[in-house]
């Protein structure tokens, strides 16, 4: 008999209460990864596994607060006789486990409540109801817009788009995770021939339409909202930005400061050139090649991001910004300083309702 076999046989059986608590915790937290792990052949919940559920490395599977309401409700569900029986059978079988559908459904619903849309998508997909659930959330979002409930509509749209699935993923289909870093680079892939061609100063209708598609990472979902009046679209964009980015006000403060730096720099150049130019339409030229001007120009993306990227290119600052504050990419533009330096700068459209509502307009 091998050492592995003797070790497995010497392991004490896992007590049912521990199994119940672990499963209930995963269900309560909407954690599909831990839930599926507990049914694998090497799961510490299996008596035939050498892994010990009471070892420190598996402490994350056990609940920290057993008085939490969501955990108690999940534990009650796990302790149902039919559920317990099914779980025990699956932990004893050698082949692929059949996960208890009632627990997977409860887990998915909790994941939605907690904003874990990727986990919810995986759980609903296991139950083969993801598409139906997504359609239901889209319908709820449209109904909320019909009655003018913007916060509820934004929440439902975020859930619905969060349930998107990528069936082309390798080696198996996976949830379609939003990638604002890549999408931000696509938005700014082409250098604007004129400052007024840049994204932030496009006509309001076009800018809002782009913002919806970018923020939702779903063109079809954005199209549903674009059928509404422009005023409602603007409210949705504002609510969506706030919902996606709790730290937006911190970025807005950096943005206003960057605007002041850019404005002061432009005023210096205007005096140097002895001509008038509007800040939003001015083109920075090779006159900025002086060390002082270049140093001031470099401060602009650093201020926007709130930190310095050593030898940072414009696209590096843009990717970092999009990761921290996805909507930031909608209010910046590429700007060549000289033949060797390109940066991102704040740029606003004066008649757009978005900047003042989002705290981006300097005092």
Image (cartoon, helix red, strand yellow):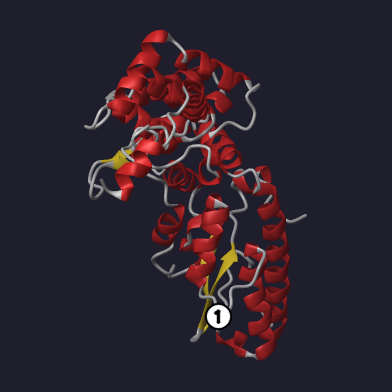
Could you say which is closer to the camera, residue 342 or residue 169? 169
**Where does the image place residue 67, in percent across and percent down from the top left?**
66, 21
The image quadrant that residue 226 belongs to is top left
At x 59% / y 39%, what residue is drawn?
Answer: 238
User: Residue lying furthest right in this view?
Assistant: 363
**Where does the image place residue 177, in percent across and percent down from the top left?**
39, 45
Whether residue 251 appears in this view of the structure is yes
User: Residue lying furthest bottom in this view?
Assistant: 290
Pointer 1: what residue? 311
At x 55% / y 33%, what residue is drawn?
Answer: 62
Whether residue 130 appears in this view of the structure is no
User: Residue lying furthest top in this view?
Assistant: 81
Asked if residue 345 lies left or right of residue 80, the reply is right
At x 64% / y 28%, what residue is drawn?
Answer: 65
**Where does the image place residue 362, in percent across and percent down from the top left?**
73, 56
Residue 244 to residue 268: above or below:
above
Could you say which is closer to the camera, residue 46 or residue 271? 46
Within 10 Å of disc 1 (Cα), the crowding (few <14, some 14-19, many 20+) is few
Asked if residue 160 lies left or right of residue 245, the reply is left
Task: Tell how many labels.
Answer: 1
**Where does the image place residue 363, in percent across and percent down from the top left?**
78, 54
Asked if residue 199 lies left or right of residue 102, the reply is right
At x 64% / y 77%, what residue is drawn?
Answer: 297
Residue 233 to residue 346: above or below:
above
Residue 275 to residue 63: above or below:
below
Name the image quarter holding the N terminus.
Answer: top left
Could you say which is closer to the camera, residue 41 or residue 307? 41
**SS for callout 1:** loop
């Amino acid at each position: 008999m091998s050492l592995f076999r003797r070790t497995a046989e010497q392991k004490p059986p896992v007590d049912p209460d521990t199994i119940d608590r672990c499963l209930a915790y995963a269900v309560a937290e909407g954690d599909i990864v831990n839930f599926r792990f507990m049914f694998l052949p090497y799961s510490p919940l299996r008596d035939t596994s050498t892994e010990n559920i009471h070892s420190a490395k598996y402490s994350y599977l056990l609940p920290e607060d057993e008085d939490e309401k969501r955990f108690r409700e999940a534990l009650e569900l796990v302790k149902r006789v039919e559920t317990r029986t099914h779980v025990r059978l699956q932990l004893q079988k050698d082949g692929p486990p059949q996960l208890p559908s009632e627990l997977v459904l409860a887990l998915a619903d909790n994941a939605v409540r907690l904003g874990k849309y990727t986990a919810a998508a995986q759980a609903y997909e296991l139950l083969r109801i993801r598409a139906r659930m997504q359609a239901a959330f889209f319908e709820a979002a449209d109904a909320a817009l019909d009655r003018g409930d913007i916060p509820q509509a934004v929440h439902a749209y975020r859930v619905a788009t969060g349930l998107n699935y990528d069936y082309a993923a390798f080696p198996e289909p996976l949830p379609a995770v939003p990638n604002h870093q890549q999408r931000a680079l696509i938005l700014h892939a082409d250098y604007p021939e004129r400052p007024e061609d840049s994204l932030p100063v496009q006509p309001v209708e076009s800018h809002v339409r782009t913002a919806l598609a970018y923020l939702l990472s779903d063109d079809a979902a954005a199209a549903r909202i674009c059928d509404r009046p422009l005023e409602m679209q603007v409210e949705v964009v504002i609510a969506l930005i706030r919902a996606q980015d709790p730290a937006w006000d911190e970025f807005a403060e950096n943005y206003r400061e960057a605007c002041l730096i850019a404005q002061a720099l432009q005023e210096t150049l205007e005096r140097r050139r002895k001509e008038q130019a509007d800040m939003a339409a001015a083109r920075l030229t090779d006159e900025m090649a002086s060390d002082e001007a270049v140093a001031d120009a470099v401060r602009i993306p650093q201020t926007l991001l709130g930190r310095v990227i050593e030898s940072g290119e414009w696209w590096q600052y843009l990717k970092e910004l999009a990761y921290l504050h996805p909507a930031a990419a909608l209010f910046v533009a590429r700007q060549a300083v000289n033949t060797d330096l390109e940066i991102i700068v704040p740029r606003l459209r004066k008649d757009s309702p978005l900047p003042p509502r989002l705290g981006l307009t300097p005092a």
